[in-house]
Amino acid sequence: MIKVSFCNVDQACGREHPKPRSDKGAGAERASGPMLFDDLKSFAPRAVSGYALYYLMIDQIGRAELTRPVIAKRTFTSAIERIFLLQDGDDVTTILPLDADDAVEDFEPQIVRK
C-alpha cells in the first residue's frame, strides 16, 4: 500500500522540508492523502486511508531522501516522514556518473509481457 514517485527538489536532507523544482498539480495533492486541517501545524503523522505516497527527492548536488510530503497550494508544505538516503559527506564511490562512455558487458534485460 505504498506508492513512490520522483521529484527534483531545491535542497534534500536539510533542516527545512524540500521544495519541488516544479509545481505539483491537483492530482498529486489528492494522491498524497486527505488533508482535513491543512492550515494547522502537525506534530504527529496523519492517518491516511489507502496508499501512502512517498517521493524520492534528489537535489542538484546529489543528496537524496525518501519523503512522505503534505502537498498543498502546488508545493510541499510539510513532511509526515523523511528518510535521508544520501547526505553530504556520504561515500559516493559506488555511484557511477551518467556520462560515462563505458559499455555494459554481460547484461541481458528481462522482457516480460504484462
Image (spheres, rainbow, N blue to C red):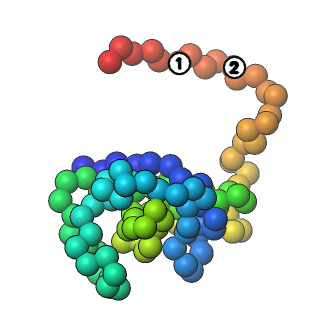
Name the image quarter holding residue 25: bottom left
Crowd tier of the residue under label 1, counting other residues whose Cα lies within 10 Å: few below 14, some 14–19, many 20 or above: few
Left or right: residue 23 compared with residue 39: right
Residue at the far right in the pictured view? 101
Locate the C terminus and report the quarter of the image it occupies. top left
113 relative to 97, above or below: above
Mark 1: secondary structure: loop
User: Is 25 or 12 nearer to us in this picture?
Assistant: 25
Residue under the image location 19 percent in, 54 percent down: 50
Q: Position of residue 95 (x, y in %)?
A: 69, 47
Which residue is the site of mark 2? 105
Left or right: residue 43 compared with residue 1: right
Which residue is the site of mark 1? 109
Q: Is residue 6 visible?
A: yes
Q: Tell me which amino acid carries mark 1.
A: Pro
Q: Is residue 53 visible?
A: no
User: Is 39 or 42 nearer to us in this picture?
Assistant: 39
Q: Position of residue 31 (x, y in %)?
A: 31, 53
User: Is 39 or 90 nearer to us in this picture?
Assistant: 39
Q: Tell me which amino acid carries mark 2.
A: Glu
5 relative to 12, above or below: above
Residue under the image location 80 percent in, 34 percent down: 100
Crowd tier of the residue under label 2, counting other residues whose Cα lies within 10 Å: few below 14, some 14–19, many 20 or above: few
Residue under the image location 27 percent in, 61 percent down: 33
Left or right: residue 101 compared with residue 11: right
Camera-near label (2 vs 1) is 1
CA distance for labels 2 and 1: 12 Å
Name the image quarter holding residue 11: bottom right
Q: Position of residue 83 (x, y in %)?
A: 47, 66
Instruction: State how many labels appear.
Output: 2
